[in-house]
Amino acid sequence: MPELPEVETVKNGIARFIGNSRILSIKITNRKFRIAIPEDTEKNIIGAKIESYQRIGKYVVIGLDNNFCIVWHLGMSGKIKTLKKQPTQPEKHDHIIIETENGWLIYNDPRRFGLFTTINKNSLNNSELFKNTGIDPFDENLTADFLFEKIKNKKTPIKITLLDQSIICGIGNIYASEILYESKISPFRESNKISKKECAVIIKNTRAVLQKAIDNGGSTLRDYQKPDGSLGYFQNMHCVYNKTGQKCPNCTCNTEQTGGIKKAVQAGRSTFYCETLQK
């Protein structure tokens, strides 16, 4: 599933491509997604002009001049393609085709775990999708005091807590492993054992890791690609994720003795870590 850097990259790619253009038409060939696409979607979109772009957690939100927002989630395998000309032959799993004054947006989603809907701007923050959404990693209100108060009574491992979208939104499995590695904190440490000073370290590294990933177009693992069809590069910069048995960049240990980077499963998700550096 695309995480914050990938969604930010997709949002920026769409914004650069079609800008504040008007939506001329939309063709939906399959409405059966994680949540069925509402029947009034076409009416809420066609003829509206795009006013703004934002990311909320792992969602792309496109503001229109008719008081509606397009809310888009890529699910497990979804991708948004940008084209200057109308495709002569849609590809398999091209479920949504949007024509704008500046080009075409196509939503392709083989598994259909994604989401595409419209929400009134005045109801956005209170909608079922966002009412329990946590703070954004780049929000200035995310401080060591804030995070410490959120986790000080939690006995869940800190890796699992970082994946809790009601605390901090947008962090997924890849980046949780990378953030904890940079913070030299074990993914298995109980959250209530994390000090306020360590909370500050986690926040600092969260922003650094996510920003570096955004700057490099995100991580292309399996299905993700940018709207123009190019791939992200951050997967080439991972320190621990998917590096089982390899030596981590900042470690001086003998991998023949330690076995290198370890892989474990936490709450059904793969965790990668260096047990020498992370305590």
Image (cartoon, rainbow, N blue to C red):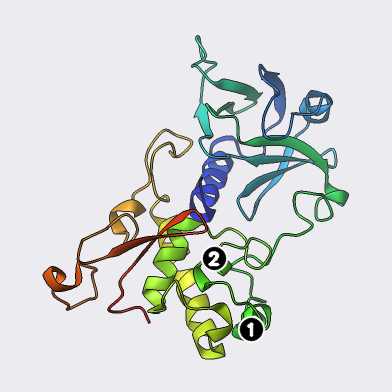
* Residue that mark 2 sits on: 160
Helix or strand or loop: what does disc 2 sit on?
helix
- Quadrant assignment, res 31: top right
Q: Amino acid at mark 2?
A: Ile
The answer to whether 107 is drawn above or below residue 242 in the figure is: above
Mark 1: give few (<14), some (14-19) or many (20+) Cα within 10 Å: some
Residue 230 drawn at (x, y percent)? 38, 37
Residue 238 drawn at (x, y percent)? 32, 59
Please tell me which of labels 2 and 1 falls first in the chain: 1
- Quadrant assignment, res 163: bottom right
Q: Is residue 95 left or right of residue 204?
A: right
Residue 172 drawn at (x, y percent)? 52, 57
Helix or strand or loop: what does disc 1 sit on?
loop
* Residue that mark 1 sits on: 152
Q: CA gap, disc 2 to disc 1?
A: 14 Å
Q: In the image, what residue occupies the spot 56% across and 39% down?
A: 14
Q: In the image, what residue occupies the spot 58% across and 39% down?
A: 74
The answer to whether 180 is drawn above or below residue 143 in the figure is: above
Q: Amino acid at mark 1?
A: Lys
> How many numbered callouts?
2
Residue 76 drawn at (x, y percent)? 53, 39
118 and 101: which is toward the camera = 118
Q: Is residue 201 left or right of residue 115?
A: left
